[in-house]
Amino acid sequence: MRYSGEMGRRIAEMVGRPPCLGPSRVARLALALSAALIGSALVSPAARADVKQAYVQGRRADLDFSLVGSVSLDFRRSNRPGNLIVVFVVWDNGGGVSLSDSSGNTYAPAVDPTQTGGDSPLSAQIFYAGDIKGGANNVTVTFADPIDKHASIYIHEYTGIGRLVPFDSAVAASGTSAEMTSAALQTRSSSELLFVGVASDGRSIKRLTPGYHVRGLRPGELTADAFSGPASSLAVPYSATATQSGTGWTMQLAAFQYIGATPSTPEYPVGLGPVVGGVSSRYLVDHGGTPFLITGDSPQSLFVNLSESQANAFFANRRKRGFNTLWINLLCADYSGGRADASTYDGIRPFTSDFDISTPNEAYFSRVDDMIRLAARRGITVLLDPAETGSFLQVLEDNGADAARAYGRYLGSRYQGFDNIIWMSGNDFHLNQLPTPEEDAVVQAVALGIQDVDKHHIHTVELNFTLSGSLDDPSWAPIIQLNASYTYFPTYAQVLKDYDRNAMPTFLVEANYELDNRQEDGEPRSIRKQAYWTLLSGATGQMYGNGYTWPFLAGWKSHYDTPSAKQMGYAKRLFESVYWYELVPDKDHKVVTAGFGEFSDSARVSENDYVTAARTPDGSLVMAYLPTNAPITVDMTQLSGPANASWYDPSRGRFQRIAGSPLPNTDTMMTFTPPGLNHDKDTDWVLVLEVN
């Protein structure tokens, strides 16, 4: 967290710099359709462009033969990996059905089978398969009892549905009247995809609820979809209505977590790397098991200070610059760049009753939903703090642990289906002091409440400044899966300390920010030093920050497309081009044996000259970050063969090949001297030694 006023002066005294006395902190995806549906609402036809964006393809197959035990149907086009398949099955007996496909996807029922009443009973059921495999696909429905006369299957593919928890909830109803009405459906969040399947023993279905788009149709049957409008556990439920001409009907309605159009290869982290030889990996992985390198920015007050269009533009810029993670506070008051009453720029407060956390305001959280979806469309993970402790620690204490846990359950239910979230508790608890047991109790209650419902997302916690790691407070160890290193001093010291704990991956959650000279110069060279020190000390990534955009000060639009923001992208590009997740920090100087400067956990970043280096266990890669032009000595026998050697300019993102490459690995020691000033007229360079 940043700081000002008296706290700023206290920190400045510690590091010998005057504080920057900046401004004090104390100081929808769719338009709603106003149609009455038993107290429900769907989106307007104008908003159905998003539905078309979600719907990919569909087909129908009919069987009108007796004693058929299964039916198969091909998708006309290959499925896209990560998408959702929804299948509606209608058949003429009371036996069960099971689904499989040629891609090996797993199908689950959205709801139990229901039967029509009337003279010719039919059974119907919705199934789904989430996070599907890509490629050509054939879906097979197998009937426990061979059909007597008729069966239909409707297969649909959708995109933009959450991978972690695609399904939200479903209801079913049946009857014999001409008017059909589904049971009331409660959804967890706004803008979900609603899917309805209808079966009747008549030939005509008419007057389907406005706003639904019919996807499959035959006499007496249909499937359709729509988006919900604003809804939550506090809102009116949804339903669907239609009329039919037969003697009996059944209607099923299911809701799926809609995120929106996402990149072709979403990078959202979902877990920890594999355990090898009994040792846990030190990195995160995404949906496909690919190591995930956090490259983050910290627009902490974005939810309350930007409109959705401004947020979307910010996300687009950050994605362009290589950022894949953004720290945003779910609740934001004056401590973290917002307003004292925690309201948005246009006056929407998070709770309907002051700071009573049992009264969440749907308008506020619905906007947050939409912004997180906008981030997902840019492939950005949100490091989401549910109640940052700079402003909300006292609020949580005033509400109590039971209310805090209930608030956590509300958040867990609402956001468990959002793929692009890492939960981060805390913020600044104290200056160089761990939380008290009483403080831990209420903050942990929120995290535990989230975990009561949301079993899918990673958790971390930021503790005290100016120096801490999440595991400094052992009571957090059972709750978190990711350690957050926090320091305003040379970052390698705290990151290495946390790396050595060998308990979980660590990342740099916060250090000195660009254009924020409360403690350091905020210049690009210092920001680069923090990043490269971190990435060569065993971290699974690091967060950058900007003095204008964590609180979105006046003029921020002219101060966020900065040199350091661009250079964070250069760092990401370099490390993702190598096996960064296999690098082991050279803590004992077996690789860089001389010229590595002075190790310090309390020096000023701008003045420290320490060289961080790392090597892969197989000796195929060595990297070292040199803050100065001073030469270093490398033991070349640490490499497994002759090495292609180059200097990487971290200020420009360009390589310079070192003459004589590939260099032999038989000479025990070799001296490397950086090639003068880099593009920014600074002295820092990265040495890269790679074995073919």
Image (cartoon, helix red, strand yellow):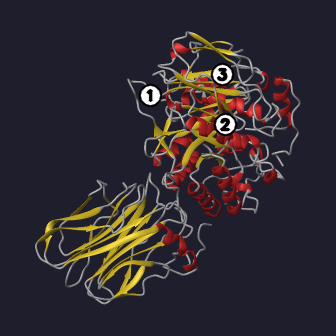
Alpha carbon of mark 2 to alpha carbon of mark 1: how far? 34 Å
* Closer mark to the observer between disc 2 and disc 3: 2
Q: Is residue 497 left or right of 142 when viewed as pictured?
A: right
Upstream in the sequence, badge 2 or badge 1?
1
Q: Where is residue 281 in the image (x, y as percent from the top left)?
A: 46, 29
| Circle on res. 654 | 2
Q: Which of marks 1 and 3 is nearer the N terminus?
A: 1
Q: Crowding near pointer 1: few (<14 within 10 Å), some, many (20+)?
A: some
Q: Label 1 amino acid? A: Ser
Dot 1 corresponds to which residue?
280
Residue type (three-letter) at the residue carrying disc 2: Arg
Q: How far from the left and from the top, in percent, is residue 498?
A: 58, 24
215 on left or right of 192: left
Find out whether the residues at labels 2 and 1 contact each other: C-beta distance under 8 Å.
no
Residue behind mark 3: 493
Q: Which of 356 and 662 is in front in this view?
A: 662
Work out whether mark 2 precedes mark 3 in sequence or the reverse, and give the earlier one: 3
Pointer 2 local density, CA inside 10 Å: few below 14, some 14–19, many at least 20: some
Using the image, tell me which numbered label, if any, was put on residue 658: none
Single out the residue that lies furthest toward the front: 660
Q: Which of the two discs, 2 and 1, sits closer to the camera?
A: 2
Which quadrant of the view contains residue 256? bottom left
